[in-house]
Image: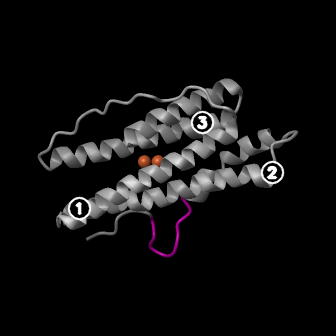
Amino acid sequence: MEGKSSAYYLSMASWCDKEGYSTSADFLYRHSEEERQHMLRIFGYINDAGGHALQPVIDEIPYDFKNLREIFELILEHEISVTQSINDLVDHCFGIRDFATFHFLQWFVAEQREEETLARRALELFDIIGEDGVGLWTIDQEIGKLESFAQKPGPAGDTGDVPPA
Ligand SMILES: [Fe+2]
Ligand SMILES: [Fe+2]
């Protein structure tokens, strides 16, 4: 799913690029790269544990989108499905008492919270600013500022990373 996220966001980035939403395009190109890093994190964990991580088959990635808003609606929908998938893994690991993997997955639990927040904030921009006139141009600009918002540290000590054991 992390690999699929990377391909999905790359496709979205390209669409934004050709439509002239350059800030959203930059944001999505970076996001696509981050998702690839998430996938590699899992590859490393599996191989270090004696398994064999397999390059996933990724298909059915859409190339065309209705408008900028639809892109962020699809991101939120997709991130919610990734969260559910991570939650299933966490639940499974707990059930079989694989506490090492349970611990490894906590980073992803925190990451998903951040990603969903980011997508929700992006969608709010469409309601707050409105899409008429220079609205879409302004929304595109504001999307560039969202990353710093999502990475803002939470309560003291909450860096989004797994705490030292
Ligand atoms: Fe991810
Ligand atoms: Fe994500």
Evaluate if marks 2 and 3 touch, with contact meaning CB atoms under 8 Å apart: no
- Under 8 Å from ligand 1: the CB of mark 1? no
Which quadrant holds residue 69? top right
> Separation of disc 2 and disc 3 at Cα?
21 Å
Sequence-first disc among 3 and 1 = 3
Q: Residue at (44%, 37%) from the top-left corner?
A: 6
Give the SS element for disc 3.
Answer: helix
Residue 79 at x, y percent in the picture: 49, 50
Quadrant the N terminus occupies? top left
Please tell me how crowded label 1 is: few (under 14), some (14-19), or many (20+) other residues with Cα within 10 Å: some
Q: Nearer the viewer, mark 2 or mark 3?
A: 2
Residue 28 is a magenta residue: no
Q: Secondary structure at mark 2?
A: helix
Which mark lies nearer to you, 3 or 1? Answer: 1
Amino acid type at circle 2 is Ile
The magenta stretch spans which residues?
Answer: 151-159
Residue 131 locus on image (x, y percent): 81, 43
Of mark 2 and mark 1, the one earlier in the sequence is 1
Q: Which residue is mark 2?
A: 129
Calculate the distance from the C-alpha at mark 3 to the C-alpha at mark 1.
36 Å
Asked which quadrant contains residue 70, the reply is top right
Mark sitting earlier along the chain (2/3): 3
